[in-house]
Image (tube, helix red, strand yellow):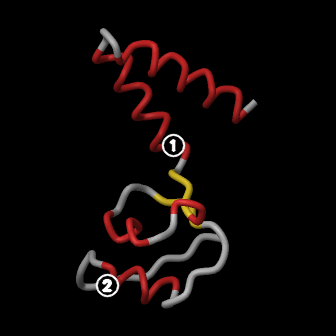
Amino acid sequence: MAAFVICLGRGTAGLTTLLGKTIHGIVTSDRWSAYHGLHLEQRLICWAHLKRDFQKCLGRGGGALPVGQGGLRLVRRMFR
């Protein structure tokens, strides 16, 4: 399910408006700071965001290179 709401601000109040005070289940999200209040067991980072992060690691090179390569292998495997 995807849900959207338009709020004046970008704080925790917007998240509460969208999902309610008590969240059941798992939320797949970006890294919007309002999600920091969720327990880690309830939160997954969006795979498209992770893929971009791993791609950036390739561009940085050095010690970030194996992280990017390994991460992109996982992304490919996930979507295969």
Q: Is residue 15 left or right of residue 72?
A: left
Residue 55 percent across, percent down from the top left: 41, 25
Give residue 16's position: percent from left, percent from top: 43, 86
Instruction: State how far apart marks 2 and 1 are (Cα).
Output: 24 Å
> Callout 1, which amino acid?
Ala
Depth check: 3 or 45 in front?
A: 45
27 sits to left or right of 61? right
Three-letter amino acid code at the position of disc 2: Cys
Quarter of the picture holding the C terminus? top right
Residue 41 image position (x, y, % from top left): 59, 61
Quadrant hosting residue 32: bottom left
Q: Quadrant of the N terminus?
A: bottom right
Foreground: 5 or 49?
49
**74, above or below 30, in the image:** above
Query: Compared with residue 35, is residue 6 higher up or lower down, i.e. above or below?
Result: below
Image point 30% across, 9% down: which residue?
62
Q: Which mark is residue 6?
A: none
Q: Nearer the viewer, residue 54 or 6?
A: 54
- Identify the element where label 1 is drawn: helix
| Residue for badge 2 | 7
Residue on which disc 1 sits: 48
Give the SS element for disc 2.
loop
